[in-house]
Image (spheres, rainbow, N blue to C red):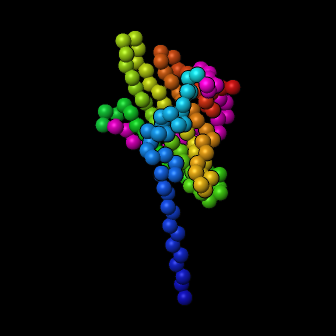
Amino acid sequence: MVFTAMIFLLVRPSMVFSNSSEISGSRVFKNYKTEWPSSDGPRANDPYRSLLQLTPISFNSAGNHGTGSNFVDINGDGLVDLLYINHGTSYFNSQNIGWVQKYAVLINKGNGFDVIYKCVVHNDNFVQLYGDCAAQ
């Protein structure tokens, strides 16, 4: 006799954020320029840099803006966690060309998610890192 078990994973995005703009917007990355630690170089031994680099990114048709997310159990508790990337938000003004890249790691607590890592890389004529990826 053979028994087959089926496991269904229900991920309800509304438990986290209603859409990706809420992650990249004010809820996770609020006041990064004024309230987060910053540096012009990366943090040594950043525990999430290599993990975030494995997250697939979908770019828009112009190829200048992309977002990606990956659902994976980071901490081994059996709950699906979230890796989030927003790459290459470009802007142009009369003085310069710049871009902003945003990264976040959200741990699933079973009844919601906690942001355990957040990083913004901002280029406005020079690169500045904010948050958990900035050198301390």
> Can residue 35 be spotted in the picture?
yes
At horizontal 62% and vertical 59% (from top left) the residue drawn is 78
Q: Nearer the viewer, residue 119 or 3?
A: 119
Q: Nearer the viewer, residue 127 or 12?
A: 12
At horizontal 51% and vertical 72% (from top left) the residue drawn is 6
Along the horizontal axis of the image, is 13 left or right of 48? left
Q: Main secondary structure of the magenta part?
A: loop
74 to 65, vertically: above or below: below
Give how far across and how far down residue 17 sits, in percent. 49, 46
72 to 29, vertically: above or below: below
In the image, which residues are magenta? 35-60
Name which quarter of the figure residue 40 lies in. Answer: top right
At horizontal 47% and vertical 51% (from top left) the residue drawn is 14
Instruction: Classify the position of the N terminus by image quarter.
Output: bottom right
Name which quarter of the figure residue 39 lies in. Answer: top right
Give how far across and how far down residue 118 sits, in percent. 58, 35
Outermost residue toward the right in this view: 136
Q: Nearer the viewer, residue 98 or 110?
A: 110
Instruction: Classify the position of the C terminus by image quarter.
Output: top right
Tally of numbered discs: 0
Q: Is residue 57 magenta?
A: yes
At horizontal 48% and vertical 34% (from top left) the residue drawn is 25
Along the horizontal axis of the image, is 66 left or right of 104? left
Outermost residue toward the bottom in this view: 1
Q: Is residue 127 magenta?
A: no
Give how far across and how far down residue 26 sits, in percent. 50, 33
Outermost residue toward the left in this view: 61
> Can residue 73 be spotted in the picture?
no
Give how far across and how far down residue 27 sits, in percent. 53, 37
